[in-house]
Image: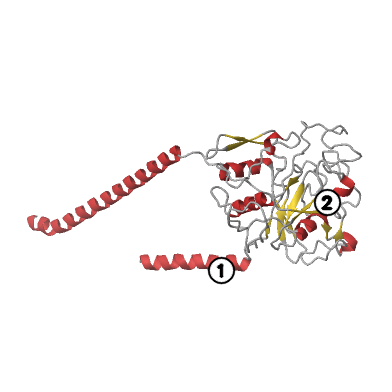
Amino acid sequence: MDEFRAARSPHALQATVLWLWIVSWIAAGIASYLKAFFLGLALLVAAPAAADPITYEMVTVADKNNTDDRTGYGSVAYDYKIGTYDVTIGQYAAFLNAAAATDTYSLYNSSMGSDGNIKGIQQNGSSGSYFYSVIGSADRPITYVSWFDAARFANWMTNGQGNGSTETGAYTLNGVTSGDAVAVNPGAAFSIPTQNEWYKAAYYSPTLNSGTGGYYNYATQSNTAPGNIVGGTVNQANSVVGGVFSVTQSSSYSVSQNYLTDVGAFTGSGSFYGTFDQSGDVFQWNDLDGQPGSTRGLRGGSWGYYVSTDTSSAQFAVVAPSTESGSVGFRLAGPVVPEPSTYALACAGLACWGWQIFRFRRAR
């Protein structure tokens, strides 16, 4: 019996040492995990609450290589995306709260909070700790934005929102707030649409002319000037009809009346591709032909302009990029991101399977 015990004792000792090592390794792992967990929890509690990222809805504009309209605009050689709606007061307020605590680049215009016809954002606090609150409906379009403001919003969106830069990304601005507009950088996820991109999304339909494609006069899929009754009736827009404002249905003008409508309020009056308010509510910036220059374009008409002329495809304006007005807002465009092909997905699956086999063999 003593010989048996003597023969067994080295193995028993090794087993005991191994067991103690395993237990200590597990305990150390649990302690490390708990330490990391509680440290992360403490940091989470101590950190200020981050704003939720905004969602910017876009539609795909397909039917590439379409021909120009009789106006000379509308042909686009590629598929792309464009905002379903104008950028809203709520979305721009989120941008200001993320990027304009000091407001170095004058992203906020005081008229956003004081012009009774369009007001929607109030600036609070002092420089270095400015914060911004919404007045009234957050779903109305933002106004009093220059092309430079819109370009910085596009940069911020391209850079993932949050603490994303406003100076590079879609446009390389480097602090400039006036003068010439610059061209969009290749590969930008968001940008200001070119005039052709904006025009096609508003007026083109591939179903017109027996399926060969063509253009409507208005962005409501109509060749007849829209009415201005808010709701689901077809061919309506926020513009002046017969001297009557859309929101009030009155010809009387008031300095304290907000004349903006929520984006998409005219639910029966979208374009073929599903955009809304490209006729009426506010004019929108476009990048003309996309080249650098001292001017940029405006299209679409506005709440204070006559529907029969200013909202039609024939009307546009060319202005300085620094222009700001209670009738001017913007929407964004972007590239179409290809869906993963079946072949690519199959290759990815085979790669994952091969990696698992490799790991299994190494473990053996």
Q: Quadrant of the C terminus?
A: bottom left
**Alpha carbon distance from label 2 to label 1:** 43 Å
- The residue carrying pointer 2 sits among few (fewer than 14), some (14 to 19) or many (20 or more) residues within 10 Å by Cα, namely many
- The residue carrying pointer 1 sits among few (fewer than 14), some (14 to 19) or many (20 or more) residues within 10 Å by Cα, namely few
Mark 2 vs mark 1: in front: 2
Please give the name of the residue rendered at 32% of the width and 49% of the height, measured from the top-left corner: 29
Going from the N terminus, do you reach mark 2 or mark 1 first? 2
Dot 1: element: helix
The amino acid sitting under disc 2 is Ala
Report x, y in % for residue 103: 58, 43
**On screen, residue 146 above or below 64:** above
Q: Quadrant of the N terminus?
A: bottom left
Please give the name of the residue rendered at 24% of the width and 53% of the height, measured from the top-left corner: 21
What label does residue 347 carry, if any? 1
What label does residue 219 carry, if any? 2
Residue sticking out furthest to the left: 2
Report x, y in % for residue 35: 35, 44
Please give the name of the residue rendered at 90% of the width and 38% of the height, measured from the top-left corner: 243
The amino acid sitting under disc 1 is Cys
Report x, y in % for residue 87: 69, 46
Dot 2: element: loop
> Of residues 44 and 322, which is closer to you in this image?
322
In the shown orientation, is residue 71 left or right of residue 122?
Answer: right
> Of residues 40 and 98, which is closer to you in this image?
98
Report x, y in % for residue 149: 65, 49
Please give the name of the residue rendered at 37% of the width and 67% of the height, measured from the top-left corner: 362
> Of residues 98 and 345, which is closer to you in this image?
98
What label does residue 282 carry, if any? none
Residue 67 in which image quadrant: bottom right
